[in-house]
Amino acid sequence: MNEQFDFRALLIKLQDSLSDDDRRRLHFLVGDVIPRQIRDDPSLSGTLNLLESLFDQQRINEQDFDYLIYAFGGLRCYDAVKRLKEHQRYHKRQHEDETILSESAKDDAQDKMSVINFSRVMSSDIPKAHESITIENKPVIINQQNSQNSSHVPEIPIKSEEKLLNVYLKNIKQMTKSRLTIFQLVLFILNIIDLILIKVGFLHGNGFGGDSFNDAEDCSLTFNDRLIGITASWSTDKLECVTFTYSNGKSKQHGRTIYPSVGHTYEFELNSNEYIDGVTVYTGIRWIVNRFKPNGTFLVVGLRFHTNQGRQSELFGSSNGTENDEYLPNHTLGYVRGQAFAYINALQFIWYKETSRTASAILPTY
């Protein structure tokens, strides 16, 4: 089945979780973008017509349905929000897997061609090369007047030998590509103890917008490093940017860096034995300059951090959106990755057990 069929099937299933009051509220909420006759018909048939109208207006499609997630979030239909986000994450992973499989198939094809070419070289080029480097005795005329007095010197075509050597090196390099994959697998196994102690949080926001970032890579973090401070700037209804500062002296800012229109800036510093063990994230649609999302962009609009000492930061940004709490006792917030450009499109928190931190362990990134 295609992706659009799967998405429409999900929308039909979501109808079972909506009460009659939910339908009425949904029709009222989006009443300014649907025809009056659809808005006044909160039946199952009317709600399906509502969804079809959103399809026709290109407000939603099988790949972009942030508008619908935001609408259900506003209605507090959290089960519908959860199922839509799970569908979004599933198809994103599926696209990533297809890309990986495509690249893998391409590499396999290249490896097979390398083996074939190498075999051809071994079976055909080598004999020819050996023939070409056979020492030949050719007469060199010393005296044109006496052509009978001649001397014989060996002539060796070195260029053919160099060409053959280059062919060998090229094929060997291509054939060792699969060996590198095995080497990476060995490294993964050696770090498996560290990996099982890491927990990857939910992806909050829109994973398709902005530029990707990973603080572990950008700040060269290890398990011995810890988050010591967070600084955020925001306007009335959305985050502008957030900066994470780590104990190795490095920090990384995500979001707007040029011509900020911020109205508030706040810094939250951690004590020596304090760490983040929970985050409250608010997401929602905001109308920003984005020609790819004329109907609004799904963003991370607010953040609040909680610590093991019972403290919490000020609300960074706005609480006007869908609220999601991520809390892991006995774990500390290791680092952050996500998507950002002018605003925070998506955040994903990486957690690891406080007892697993060692001075020599390099923090695995993935």
Image (cartoon, grey):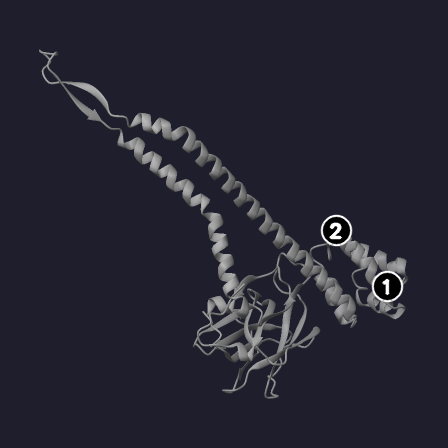
Element carrying mark 2: helix
Q: Is residue 78 left or right of residue 184?
A: right
Q: Which mark is residue 271?
A: none
Up/down of 318 relative to 210, above or below: below
Quarter of the figure with residue 346:
bottom right
Up/down of 25 relative to 65, above or below: below
Quarter of the figure with residue 121:
top left
Q: Which mark is residue 4?
A: 2
Q: Whole-Å distance between the Cαs marked 1 and 2? A: 20 Å
Q: Earlier in the sequence, mark 1 or mark 2?
A: 2
- Locate the C terminus and report the quarter of the image it occupies: bottom right
Element carrying mark 1: helix
Q: In this figure, what is the number of numbered marks?
A: 2
Please give the name of the residue rendered at 54% of the width and 41% of the height, measured from the top-left corner.
Answer: 109
Amino acid tagged 2: Gln
Residue 99 shows in the view: yes
Please give the name of the residue rendered at 75% of the width and 67% of the height, measured from the top-left corner.
Answer: 81
Q: Measuring from the top left, give residue 352's x and y in whole percent.
A: 56, 74
User: Crowding at label 1, few (<14), some or many (≥20) Cα neighbours within 10 Å?
Assistant: few
Q: Measuring from the top left, give residue 159's x and y in whole percent.
A: 29, 32
Amino acid tagged 1: Asp
Q: Which mark is residue 16?
A: 1
Relative to the observer, which residue lies in front, 199 or 71? Answer: 199
